[in-house]
Image (spheres, helix red, strand yellow):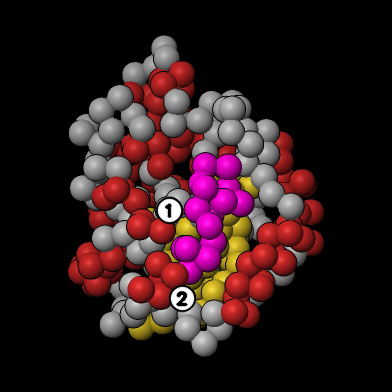
Amino acid sequence: MFWDTHLHCNFSGDSSADPEDMIRSAIEKNLDGICFTDHIDWDYPGPTPFSFDGEIYFNVLGALKEKYKKQLNIHIGVELGLQPHLKERYAAFVSQFDFDQVIGSSHVVHGFDPYYPEYYVGKTEDLAYREYFECVLENLDIFEDFDVYGHLDYVVRYGPNKNANYTYKKYQDIIDEILIKIIQKGKGIELNMSGYKYGLSHPNPTEEILLRYRELGGEILTLGADAHAPEHVAFDYCRLTGLLKKAGFRYYTVFEKRQAKMIRIP
């Protein structure tokens, strides 16, 4: 069975889920393993603080890892909300702890999160989306201490028309540049299934981008549902095998102690 390597609990500012409930949900769904990747988004512009005490985080999750070790593989990771000026702070934070996986994500674009309508004020949807992808490139040029880039087209979850007018071909020039840079740096991307939860009828990134990543030589691909509640662990994982094989993948990736392990798709 599969792993879910992108999920959140009450260490993330946008989740109230008990981590033990997330673990029990994963066991009920017969997952092979999970990786907690709670949010660190320093200097976040919204009302929600996204930070946690790393020592407490490892103490709590480490105890649960030991408690459930015979039932589920449990890894401990983090999702960093990248912004260029946070490079040194994030590097110092990551170096302090023995993370299994680090997800680098773009949530804040020049002071605004596309989650909020304010990001789109005075912009066409096309310009707003392109600015988001430019921000991803900017972060890739500055920060490298991550393993996979999270939900590459996150912005389409929240745009005025979501993905009604969005296609890979419309942004092919900049998306290809992003994918090539990720591959050249020896990093990966994730197949984030939460697009289905948000009503997009597609994962993040879309099937076309996933296929293009493979065509360009991308091999490192983690799987996650971006769950913030137990019921969303492994959300729509029934689609995974078809998505992966259609894009040309025979393996997916799990990180342990920041080292990639390739697992054959069942």
Residue 38 seen = yes
Q: Quadrant of the C terminus?
A: bottom left
Q: Earlier in the sequence, mark 1 or mark 2?
A: 2
**Residue at 67%, 33% in the rendered image:** 43
Q: Position of residue 263 (x, y in %)?
A: 41, 81
Quadrant location of residue 76? bottom right
Residue in view at x 26 percent, y 60 percent: 236
Q: Position of residue 215 (x, y in %)?
A: 32, 64
Q: Which mark is residue 33?
A: 2
- The three-letter amino acid code for the residue at tag 2 is Gly
Q: Is residue 224 above or below residue 119?
A: below
Give the image quarter of residue 19.
bottom right
Q: Is residue 110 above or below residue 135?
A: above
Q: Main secondary structure of the magenta part?
A: loop
Secondary element at tag 2: strand
Q: Quadrant of the N terminus?
A: bottom left
Q: Observer-nearest residue: 211 or 48?
A: 48
Gap between marks 1 and 2 measured at Cα: 17 Å
Q: Which residue lies under the disc numbered 1?
A: 229
Q: Can residue 218 be seen in this snapshot?
A: no
**Viewer-nearest residue: 166 or 64:** 64
> Alpha-carbon neighbours of circle 1 within 10 Å: few (<14), some, or many (≥20)?
some
The location of residue 178, given as percent across then percent down, is 46, 49
Local crowd size for mark 2, using a 10 Å CA cut-off: few (<14), some (14–19), many (≥20): some
Q: Is residue 82 left or right of residue 203?
A: right
In the displayed structure, 201 sits above or below 235; it is above
**Residue 17 belongs to the span the image colors magenta:** yes
Q: Which residue occupies 77% across, 46% down?
A: 89
Q: Which stretch did the figure color magenta?
A: 9-23
